[in-house]
Image (cartoon, grey):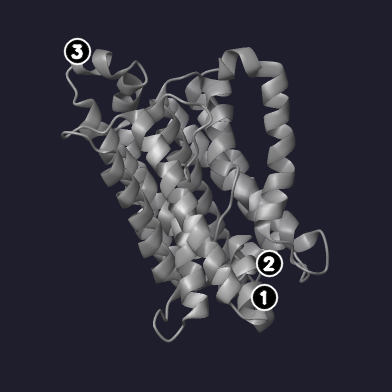
Amino acid sequence: MRPAIVLAILGLFLLCALGLGLVAGEYRLTAAQAFDVLFLKLFGTTLLTDAPLPKMHEVIVWNIRAPRLLVAALSGVALASAGSAYQGCFRNPLVEPFILGVSSGAAFGAALAIVLPHIFPSTQLTAFVFGLSAVALACGVARRKGHTPPMALVLSGIVIGSLFTALLGIMKYAASDAQLRDITFWMMGGFYYSTWRDAAILAVVVLPCFAGLFLFGWRLNLLSLGDDEAKSLGINPSASRMAIIFLATLAAATCVATAGIIAWVGLMMPHAARLMLGPDNRLGLPAAALMGAAYLLVCDTLARTLTGAEIPIAIVASLLGGPYLLWLLRSRGRDVYE
């Protein structure tokens, strides 16, 4: 199947996931009602009905579900594209967006803000700063004589991540029962309190980062050949790798600071994109981003509709992602992991 057709199908699936998310929930709405609310807010008039829309419809669709769905979709784009970029950079199919310690750093930052709210008043900002700081520290530790070897970067990321995990453990030990519940709840991830402000921040950061990674797609293809081959073809592997890591980390850190830690997306979606479109990152990045957005929309819809009480999205994503990776390991292990 042609790549353009595959991308078009993925885009259509993303639109369907958005539509499902708008109408599904405890407060039932029809597709026409949800569409009319959006049309009214965007263009000042309804399209499918002349009757006045109930105020509750506007509150549910525009104030609650629409920003939440946008945050979920943008988070999927951030994590999936970051995972694809990392896997291309390090030539390792098991690398994911949190390999350099961004999740551990962000989790420590969030815990710090929860335990010490008078010193760190913003949980999101503190998580973002410490997430980026962890990656910057990992890159600084791995740098040798102006170069950053990929394996040294991965190992330093693991070490720095372990350090921040230990610091997170200290914060949990010092936290009160209520603060410990808040830390645990944050680490499970979720879009419970998403607002238009969150959606705007994610859009301003994630979309330019994704555009930059997409433009770097051909460089990712060269990096996947190895540093010597990349140099012979006219690029600086170390500089290109650091630029790609910066864009991917910035997108992932913003997502983590907004929605908490959501695993599997950055590991699964690049694999699925390669299975459908091959190893070309110029095609794999947009495909992974579309699938990541649709996947998190489906997970979020399931998380708030399966039971009366909302399930943290990290649990739903792991329950769906684990069997997929087991199938991938069993059926495609030789092609993907060797």
Q: Is residue 255 visible?
A: no
- Residue at the spot of label 1: 57
Q: Going 42% across and 58% down the picture, which residue do you hit?
A: 254
Residue holding disc 2: 33
Q: Which residue sits furthest bottom? A: 118
Q: Position of residue 260 (x, y in %)?
A: 54, 61
Residue 232's mark?
3
Query: Which secondary structure, mark 3?
Result: helix
Q: Quadrant where the N terminus lies?
A: top right
Q: Mark 1 belongs to which amino acid? A: His
Q: Are marks 1 and 2 in contact (CB under 8 Å)?
A: yes
The residue mark sitting in front, 1 or 2, is 1
Which of the two discs, 1 and 2, labels the residue nearer the N terminus? 2
Query: In the shown orientation, is residue 264 left or right of residue 160?
Result: right
Any part of residue 249 in sight: yes
Q: Of callouts 1 and 3, which one flags the residue occurring earlier in the amino acid sequence?
A: 1
